[in-house]
Each structure stands twice: as structure tokens, then as C-alpha cells.
Amino acid sequence: MTTHLDRSVGLVTTRTARVFDDAHPLTLRSGATLGQVDVAYETYGTLNHARDNAVFICHALTGDAHAAGFHDGDTKPGWWDTIIGPGKPIDTGTWYVVCANLLGGCQGTTGPSSTNPTTGEPYGLDFPLLDMGDFVEVHRALGRHLGIDRFAAVVGGSLGGMQALQWAIDHPSEVGRAIIIAASSRLTAQNIAFSAVGRQAIMRDGDFREGRFLTEGTAPRRGLAVARMMAHITYLSETGFEEKFGRSAQRGELTKNFGVDFAIESYLEHQGERFLSRFDALSYLYLTRVMDYFDPFADPQALDALLDDPVRFLVLSFDTDWRFSTEHSRRIVRHLEGARLPTSFREIHSAWGHDSFLLDIPDYHATVRAFLERAAEDLS
Amino acid sequence: MTTHLDRSVGLVTTRTARVFDDAHPLTLRSGATLGQVDVAYETYGTLNHARDNAVFICHALTGDAHAAGFHDGDTKPGWWDTIIGPGKPIDTGTWYVVCANLLGGCQGTTGPSSTNPTTGEPYGLDFPLLDMGDFVEVHRALGRHLGIDRFAAVVGGSLGGMQALQWAIDHPSEVGRAIIIAASSRLTAQNIAFSAVGRQAIMRDGDFREGRFLTEGTAPRRGLAVARMMAHITYLSETGFEEKFGRSAQRGELTKNFGVDFAIESYLEHQGERFLSRFDALSYLYLTRVMDYFDPFADPQALDALLDDPVRFLVLSFDTDWRFSTEHSRRIVRHLEGARLPTSFREIHSAWGHDSFLLDIPDYHATVRAFLERAAEDLS
């Protein structure tokens, strides 16, 4: 692990902060309130004296606060260790990097599996429906907790990119730059369809118990695994699947049966099973639904506040991403450029589809690095 | 209904023939035998005296023998009534058209839900695994039953096209022409992945009971509906979904909940539910698995028998089909042309993805019509 640690932020721990409480509850976009909101987060690097070198990392659907470095005893680093660390594109020698599990999640931040303080039982489906703006408010509250009023950059891929966009729209004076990677401002019918079928697999599972499975001691494991397996198909390109698996057998030759025979079947089954140990079916419902409803440019005034506080945008897509194709990024860019906001756009070549945002692709990393180096020039 | 009937084959009924029995069992490619095989079929048009004007229609995954015309009392015609009928591309004024439910199906032909004569109970997972060649042998047996030793053309879309290809490979002297539409000779890892996740949804359903659900009086309805909903996403193009549904609400405005809110969600739910009344989960497993394993050109001698009996091929794809993209058709064409077989290939423009093969698309229908008109010139 030593070699890894050399180019890593090293050993890290996830901490938790209560950012809203009964005295200062969180009012959601829907009007509902949450009396207690805890946030799990990690930080890497050092906040400078001027407190102007903070970068916020927004994670994707199934991510968590552990973006970089190693938890004690782990041999695998955080989910975005490829890009965050000393000398890496998001350079912890320069930046104080904050990553938090998002509201509605299941990795330490308050979500539908948390205890509802008014009943003493898990919220289940009594947890209020969320909006992209609610994620942002919780992240801002964590910022204030850490003494940060403005982030030099907010960065995210997929659902993370959608949060970065929402943050820039809602509070442009608090965001210097936004990096929006493999994201969308508006899911298509096909996107929503995949999302809907995943939720159906969960909600139709007999062990879902109308969302009360935690109280009843069950879990919709079968439905959640099916949802995850299906989603995984959309995370990789067809070419990527062909290169990685093709039609090869999992063991020697194809034996012809209904079990795991092709290597691709083994991969999907593994992804489905592994997911069960780290993710909660209710969070899956809540977070995917936020993506479905996300449509910030439906409001023609969405970008008005940015005219006075122009956030600088970097929008990136991957050419084989068919979950959020380049067309999604182009739509974001059209809106930003229509409002004359400083926007860089680049489509990166990669064989690996949507998941490319997690990988070390030289062109991609160089582009993020250059964008943040320009941001570093503004530091006090 | 009168206007419909004018351009239709009219009222039709599905008949059943026992094409294999204990005295003459069917030996499958796997070596297993089936003592009794019944086939449900329909015919349209008239067999001529020379018995050389027969056209066989191979149906796709969830099709059945009812390809054209109306069953008594129905207001909707058979699934391929757009293309089969008097004056239509597969002209019943010229051709004697035969369509049969395939082996392993659930619409009248022997399949895993049929009664196993040795136990008196439904086969369930004791039904043997099938091969594309097994479908063909049953269809040939039906041909013999009808007094047809050679089909002027064998035609099919998707899994139907795969059967047409297999038939031409196995018995070229019995096939004049083969029309292979939106099909594949080799599923990709992504194709297999979708297929595998659909089966997982079914087999993980608590009501599947290891395939004994008929005996136990249950049915994996939730899993089968999820499998169907997911598959439907792959049948239509992203553009098609956008045109048809976009982000529109099912009722007036979006209300934000976990139920059916977007129109696309309502469509998928409807597709899933409707499927339950007409399809069986076991057939879904058996038929999709045949497609996964289909790989005829893995045998380099696959086309050798055609050198003496060159079948004429028409291979068609649709430009927005992403289930079996044009690349799949091109692979078939490369193999056929490599063996110097007379092959026409055309990619048809259509916004509607894989399902285009079921639709009345003028370019597509004109191409099929012209190909069969040339076949008609050879009739005695």
C-alpha cells in the first residue's frame, strides 16, 4: 500500500457533522422540513488562511463521502482517488477538498433509512421527496460548518455534475468554478425509463413491504440487485462490454444452462451482490427520483442571478457515454452560452462509456487539471 | 372492422398439429428428446397445385402463430398484419403463408409450461434447453404436415430472422429465399447482459419457486413484468421515446411522487401488465437463452452446404435499432458474401428502433415486396 500512499492523500476518516437541528431545521424545496440533518464528510488538504482554496466534490448516485485516500486497513482507496491527491488534477497540495455523502443517502448522511426523531423508527417512505437544490443546501451548510462561505470550485460527475450545476444556479456568488462531467440538465424519456424500471424492481420485491422493510427486518435484496445490474449495463459502452467480456465463458467453455455461464453474467451478478452490502434500496429510490425531476432550465430565468456573478464552467462528456450522451452536455452548454457565461466544453474520447468519469483518462484529467490551475492563479 | 378486412386476410383461427409423438419423437440438438410436440399455427392464402408457393413466417421472442387477419370478435389483427395480406408485401394473393408458435413458446406450441407426459405435471425447468436448430426442425415438421417440402421464402424479424438464417444454413435445399430483418448472428455482451438481467428478475421473484410455479399455483408476475419493461426500453430508440413521450406528465402536470407520474412510466407499466396475460415466464427464460447461445458462424463450415444450394438472402436493418444495430446485420452479410451467396442488404431509416420491423415503413415494405416479387417469377 506504500506506493499507493505516495500519490494519495493517505489515511483518512469519515467524520459527521449535524448541520441542521430542531432549532434550525432544513426547509426543503417541497416545503417539508427536516429537524435533524447529519452529514458524513471527508476533507483532504489544508484550508488556507484566506479560506478561499476549498473545492467541493459532489458524488454520483451510489457514491459516498470517501472520495480519496485510504480508510485504515483498506487496500482500495476512495472512489475518486484517481483525480484527487498530491500532484493529481484536483491537487491537494493546492486545494482543500471536501466531499460529503448527500442528503437522502445511506453512507452517514441523513436519509430515508435514518431514524425519524418523531417516531423513533426509520423514516421509510415517510422521508420527504428531495430536490437537487436540497442536496446543495446541505452541502452549503457543511461548508459553513467548516468555515467556508465560498468554494473556488464545485466538481462532480453524473448526478454530482447535476449538483454542481444547481449550486452555481442557486448561489453563484458562492461558487468560483463548476466542473460538470458526464451529466444532464434534463433526463430523456429513455433515461427516466431505466430509472423507473429499477425502482419497479425494488418496489415490487415482496420484501420491500411498502418501504417499511427495516422495521420489519427484511430487505428488497432481489429487487435492488436487479436494479443495480440493469443500471450497470448503462454505465459501460457496448464497445467497452465487448472489449472486456465479449461472449467469453466464465469458466472454460460455455456449458449451456440458466445459471452464470457467460463472463458478462458473472460480472453483473457480482456487481449486484456487492451493491447490497453498501447501499440501501430507499436511498436508491429517493436519489434516482431527484434525477428524473431535475430540469433547471425549464425556468427561463434560471441563469439570471449568474449575470452579476458569472461562474466559470467546464462541461465534459465522453463520446461513448450513452447514459448521458454528449448531447446532454451540449444542451447544458447551449444554455450557459446563451446566457454569455464563460464556458469551456470538451468531448473526451474514451471506450468506457458513462463510467469514464471515474477513470484515469489522460485527456480528461489534463483538462480538469488545466481548468483548476487557472483557478489557482486567483488564490490569495 | 369491414375496412380492415378489405386489406386483410380476414377471419382466421389458430389450429394445432401434433408433429412429433412417442412413435416419432423429436431429438433436440442437445441430444434430449421430446416425445410429444404440438404446434399451433395459422395459414393465409392458398397452397398452389405445385406446392411451391409457401412462405414461412418466423416470429420474434414474444410473438405467436397469429400473424395476420382477425380472430373472431377481435378488433386488432395479428402482429404482422401490416405486411401480410392481399396486395401487401407478403401478398396472400400469391403466397401460401404459414406462421407457427415456436417450440418452447406458450401460445399453443409445446413448451416448458406444457404437461410433461411422463409426470402429468408441467415441465417447468425439466424442459430441455433449446437451440435455434430445434425451432427449425419443428417448423419443418409442420411443413411436412401441411404437404410442403420446400418454402419459397422464410421470413422473420429479430429472433424470427435468426430462425430464418438457421433454416437456410441447416437445410438450404428446402429454402428458396431468406429474409432476415433486424436480427443478429451473435449477441454482444451488452445484448446478453439485458437478457440475463431480465431472467434474473424472473428467477429471483419469490413466486418463481425454482420453475415449479404452475404446480404451486403462483406466478413470478413481478419479475416477468420488470423483465418486459426493461426489454421494452431496448425495443424503441432514444429518439423514438423522446418523440412519443419526452418528459410529459401522465396526467396534466408532474406531481412528484414514486408512482406513475411521467407518461413514459405509464407506458412501461402498461406494457409490463399487458404482457402478463399473454406470456409465460418459463418461455421467456427458454427463448431468450436460445438467442444468447446462437452463434452459427462460430462453425467455419456453417455455410458449406449452401454452395450447392444457394439460398438468396435479403438482410435488413434499421438505423436507430440499438438492440440489434446495423452492425449485427453487416456481420451476417459479411459471412454470406464471404461464401459468395446472393445477398441483398439494406439499412432502412426509421425513428422507431428495433420495433420498426413490426411497422409499416414504406422503404422497408417496398424492399420486402420487390424481393418476393422476384421470387414469384420462379413459381410454376
Image: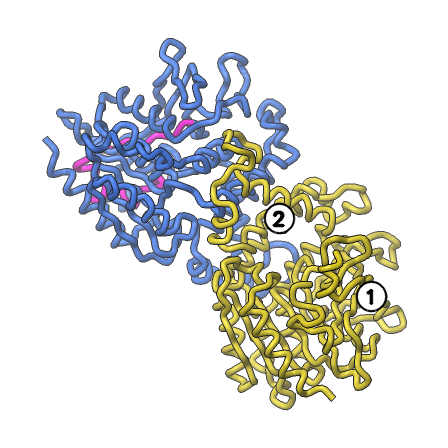
Chain colours: A yellow, B blue
Q: Element type at marker 1?
A: strand
Which chain is disc 1 placed on?
Answer: A
For this view, does B23 lie left or right of residue B257? left
Q: Earlier in the sequence, mark 2 or mark 1?
A: 1
Which chain is disc 2 placed on?
Answer: A
The reply to whether residue B248 is visible in this rendering is no
**Residue drawn at (46%, 25%) of the image:** B111
The region drawn magenta spans B77-103
Q: In the figure, A109 relative to A269: above or below?
A: below
Task: Tell me the amino acid under the disc marked 1.
Answer: Val
Q: In the figure, B206 relative to A36: above or below?
A: above
Q: In the figure, B223 relative to B129: above or below?
A: below
Mark 1, other Cα within 10 Å: few <14 / some 14–19 / many ≥20: many
Q: For this rendering, which residue is in front, A17 or A192?
A: A17
Residue corresponding to mark 2: A227
**Residue drawn at (28%, 38%) of the image:** B155
Q: For this rendering, which residue is in front, A369 or B262?
A: A369
- Image coordinates for residue B374, horizontal then vertical, percent: 14, 42
The reply to whether residue A146 is visible in this rendering is yes
Which quadrant, please, contains the N terminus of chain B?
A: top left
Q: Element type at marker 2?
A: helix
- Image coordinates for residue B300, horizontal then vertical, percent: 33, 35
Residue occupying the far top of the picture:
B23
Q: Which mark is residue A37?
A: 1
Q: For this rendering, which residue is in front, A325 or A218?
A: A325
Task: Tell me the amino acid under the disc marked 2.
Answer: Ala
- Image coordinates for residue B319, horizontal then vertical, percent: 35, 56
